Image (cartoon, rainbow, N blue to C red):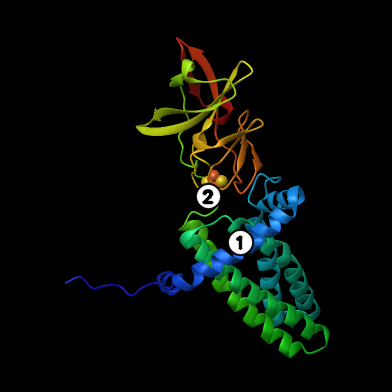
Amino acid sequence: MAIASPPGVGQVIDGVIEGQAQRLDPLAEQVQGWLRNAVARGGPTGLQLKNFLHGIWLGHPLHPALTDVPIGAWSAALLMDLFGPSKGADAAVAIGTLAAVPTALAGLADWIDTEGKPRRVGLVHATLNSLGLGLYVWSWLARRSGNRQLGVLLSTTGYSVGVVSAWLGGELVDRMGTGVSRNAWEPPVQDFQVAAREADLREGQLAAGEITVDGQKLPLVLLKQGGQIYALSGVCSHWGGPLAEGQLVGECVQCPWHGSQFSMRDGSVRQGPAQFAQPCFETRVRDGNVEVRTPRAAR
Ligand code: FES
């Protein structure tokens, strides 16, 4: 008879969050609505700020890069509280607390465009982080007023909350794939392959194409414009939206799911929430067929 192994910590936390789905989903929808309204009310500046917080300017998601600062500073503070100089610990608490604010904002910008389970887990992650941050702010104030004992107690409690929250952040990425490029496993196309008939393309209109690589079908989005033919992977790097069903906005394709925009010329991200560029293909026309391959430099 098979003996069932006890559930791991991850499964227990997962079970608790999923058990609260009926409560968490309406709350998450409401908070997302507020955040989306705030971005919309900000007009172009609101959109630019959201793009900045996604890390599009960096070519890398900003939130995970920033998390190193508060986690590092607060870890250093914990060690100095135990073994080191109290002034150093107080300074590390202050640095971590200040750095946690932009880190939280970048995380919120990413969370706005999540759905389902990642949205629920993200909400709990954000709530725990806010609780942890509140405890660190309180600790900082207590330390400044000379009550170090209370300050250490509060920051140690905040650190414990942060550890659970960091676990959930890891679950979001490693197990649920949040923030992972949907094109990460797309194989390079070594030799030119037929993607569509040229006669099926209309000047200035997006069209769908498809190739098969290593037995795997790869959808494409194509554009004929000004005598050139452009081709990108048709799977949005954000959550896999079908780009060929999107809209052409200037020289960009706009994803129909969450509105990310990619330049049809080189696949670069022009508007989030996507943070990774689309694979872009070299094209040529032979015998009335549009053929594509991965440029040498990208193979
Ligand atoms: S799937 Fe989210 S923007 Fe494309």
Residue at (76% x, 87% y) in the render: 148
Count of numbered badges drawn on the protein: 2
- Quarter that holds the N terminus: bottom left
Q: Which residue is mark 1?
A: 33
Image location (x, y in percent) of residue 232: 54, 31
x and y, in percent, of residue 241 in the image = 49, 43
Q: Is residue 60 above or below residue 192?
A: below
Q: Nearer the viewer, mark 2 or mark 1?
A: 1
The picture quadrant where one finds residue 204 is top right
Q: Could you say where residue 242 lies in the image, as x and y percent from the top left?
A: 48, 39
Nearest the eye: 56 or 5: 56
Query: Which amino acid does the dot numbered 1 rest on?
Result: Gly
At a point 78% along the width and 78% down the height, the residue shown is 90
Residue 273, which numbered label? Answer: none
Q: Is residue 1 left or right of residue 241?
A: left
* Residue shown at the point (62%, 30%) measured from the top left: 266
Report the side of 11 relative to 293 (left or right): left
The disc placed on residue 180 is 2
What element does badge 1 sit on? helix
Q: Amino acid at mark 2?
A: Val
Label 2, residues with CA under 10 Å away: few <14, some 14-19, many ≥20? some
Whether residue 53 is visible, yes or no, is yes
Residue 107 in picture, x, y percent from top left: 63, 60
Whether residues under marks 2 and 1 lie with C-beta atoms below 8 angstroms apart, the answer is no
